[in-house]
Image (cartoon, helix red, strand yellow):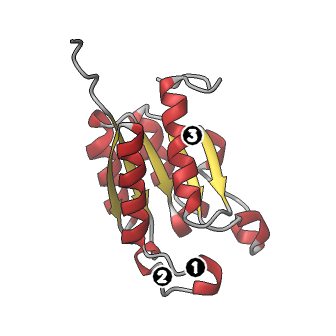
Amino acid sequence: MAPKPEALRIAVVHGPSLNLLGRREPELYGRTTLPEIDARLRDLGRELGVEIESVQANGEGELVDFIQERAARVAGFLVNAGGYTHSSVALLDALLATGRPFIEVHLTNLHAREPFRHRSLLSARAAGVVMGFGPESYLLGLRGLVARLRGEAGAPKLS
């Protein structure tokens, strides 16, 4: 019997104020909480044979530290940088320095919101961007990242 291949590990990065999901502007972000999103990601991860670890931080430096610390042991990142999407060169630099692919995700469609939210510093370097599907954005992003990492479904394999 062949040994079971080691599961891919994916790190999920939740930016500022995402800890308030479920009660922060529910008309915009819905009632699903961040722990519920993380549980759904872990469930999908088990289905896909992927290990999930996540962090939420309001501080930019904490997020950069998490990315740098996890880089050697994960295959890629799923990132909702929250408000840092539009302003953080530091997060972008940290993600690029890992050499790992990342998928940018957002609960809302940024292009249907205020003009200052239309610009993402991450999008141009992300392997993909999923937005506007509420919590499902995370699950779609995870499926896409795993497919790309494994070279499935016609998606180019990412190293």
Q: Which residue is mark 3?
A: 144
Q: Position of residue 20 (x, y in %)?
A: 44, 81
- Judge from the rendering whether residue 76 lies leftward or rightward of residue 138; answer left or right: left
The reply to whether discs 2 and 1 touch (Cβ–Cβ < 8 Å) is yes
- In which quadrant is the N terminus drawn? top left
- Judge from the rendering whether residue 32 lies leftward or rightward of residue 117; answer left or right: left
Q: Position of residue 103 (x, y in %)?
A: 54, 45
Query: Residue at horizontal 62%, vertical 42%?
Result: 128
Q: Position of residue 81 (x, y in %)?
A: 50, 61
Q: Nearer the viewer, residue 9 or 99?
A: 9
The residue sitting at the top extreme is 1
| Helix, strand or loop for disc 1 | loop
Label whose residue precedes the other's in the sequence (3 or 1): 1
From the viewer's perspective, is residue 83 above or below residue 64? below
From the viewer's perspective, is residue 156 above or below residue 134? above
Q: Which residue is mark 1?
A: 30
Label whose residue precedes the other's in the sequence (2 or 1): 2
Q: Which residue is mark 2?
A: 22
The answer to which image quadrant residue 116 occupies is bottom right
Amino acid at the residue labelled 3: Gly
Amino acid at the residue labelled 2: Gly
Amino acid at the residue labelled 1: Gly
From the viewer's perspective, is residue 6 above or below residue 9? above
